[in-house]
Image (cartoon, rainbow, N blue to C red):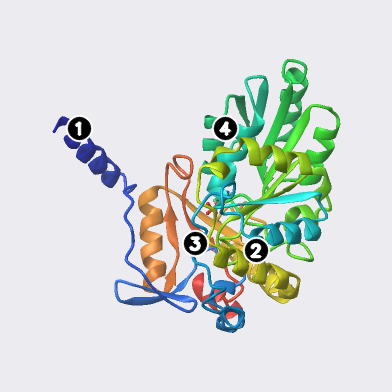
Amino acid sequence: MILIEQMQQELQELEAKSNLRKLPGILHEGRDVIVNGQRMLNLSSNDYLGLANDIELRRDFLETLTPETFLPTSSSSRLLTGNFTACEQLEQQLATAFGTEAALVFNSGYHANTGILPAVSNARTLILADKLVHASLIDGIRLSAAKSIRYRHNQYDQLERLIEINHTEYERIIIVTESIFSMDGDEADLRELVRLKKKYANVWLYVDEAHAFGVRGDKGLGCAEEQECISDIDFLVGTFGKALASAGAYIVCRKVIREYLVNKMRTFIFTTALPPVIIQWTSFVFTRLPNFRQRREKLQLVSSKLKETLEHKGYVCPSSSHIIPMITGESSIAVRKAEELQRKGFYALPVRPPTVPEGTSRIRFSLTAEISEEEIVRLTT
Ligand SMILES: *Cc1c(COP(=O)(O)O)cnc(C)c1O
């Protein structure tokens, strides 16, 4: 009874600070959502290229399926009987596109980030992670036996000092970063990180491209393609649930790392593999990724337009991507702004602590190539 009362009290405290989370009742209609009977343009999803919404694409995919080939479950872990050909083919396809020795597919980005780091580190490992990395990476660090230090966001001089001080004390150091950051929409300088890690024989680089895969680079492979450093990144991870409009995640890496993960990675070993139909859909969309250049260009255009407008209005906007925060500070202001936007027909949501640091609550615009320039204007007036 006492425990239940404690829970209720904590929930009330969250509510008092405007930090209580609730699952929204939501209907989807194309690029719109309907919440509480109101139709709004969805500016909170990660469907960056509008592929989740592309009926033509889905129709073409469905034509490749029959009741015999439509497999909604893999019924097992990859290591038992869940290793369907479609999955190995997708991995081959990824390795070929990225020009790496190997690739490995996971059930989600959360599985990838919570599984890889514990697998490849031990008590003689030091993980140096950007202060703003995603919760899944934090959890991966926590699950590992490594010692860890967080460096100030994108502050590579501090990172370099930490490496200099520590590299002889540890067997290996792993630098962990995102390429495009989830909350500020700003970017890591991957080339600089590569330069840094190459100075030391025992420093590895782990990059999470969840928000950049599909969106950046000529072929849509991410910031590492854009910055021409794919082969210099030891653990290059991305997800299929965002721009690619599917589900799951991948790493592209050396062959030995793939084999090591297959043997050591608990979130790979102890889970039922993704359904073959999802793998096939991922593969189907991935094959077409180079063709979506126009959507990528459109996304960049509307993104810079929104950023300019916000800065013009006096907001400090750290973003250089399609994720654009409007930082209000107080949670209550963010909540009020979100309600205002929703009345105008834009479904943008407030992001509050603990997702972002105390005092930096914000509206987080997560843009899609399907928004028009005219709508960007209306959004900010
Ligand atoms: C979304 C996200 C993840 C999690 O990926 P899922 O496939 O949704 O589990 C991991 N890392 C980053 C940076 C993300 O934005």
Closer to the chain start, of discs 2 and 4, is 2
| C-alpha distance separating marks 3 and 2 | 12 Å
* Mark 2 Cα shell of 10 Å, populated few (<14), some (14-19), many (≥20): some
- Label 3 sits on a secondary structure element that is loop
Q: Nearer the viewer, mark 2 or mark 4?
A: 2
Q: Position of residue 24 (x, y in %)?
A: 33, 62
Label 1 with label 4: CB-CB less than 8 Å: no
Tell me which amino acid carries mark 3: Thr
Label 4 packing within 10 angstroms: few (<14), some (14-19), many (20+): many
106 vs 113, nearest the viewer: 106
Relative height, residue 243 to residue 186 (above, below):
below
Structural distance between the alpha carbons of marks 3 and 1? 39 Å
The amino acid pointed to by label 4 is: Ile
Q: Which residue is mark 1?
A: 3
Check whether the beta carbons of the residues at disc 3 and disc 4 lie within 8 A of each other.
no
Of residue 84 and residue 173, the one placed in the foreground of this image is: 84
- Is the CB–ligand 1 distance for label 4 below 8 Å? no
Quadrant of res 113 = top right
Task: Give the CA separation, mark 3 to mark 4.
Answer: 30 Å
Q: According to the image, label 2 marks what residue?
A: 86
Q: Amino acid at mark 2?
A: Ala
Q: What residue is at 44 percent from the left and 71 percent from the top?
A: 346
CB at mark 3 closer than 8 A to ligand 1? no
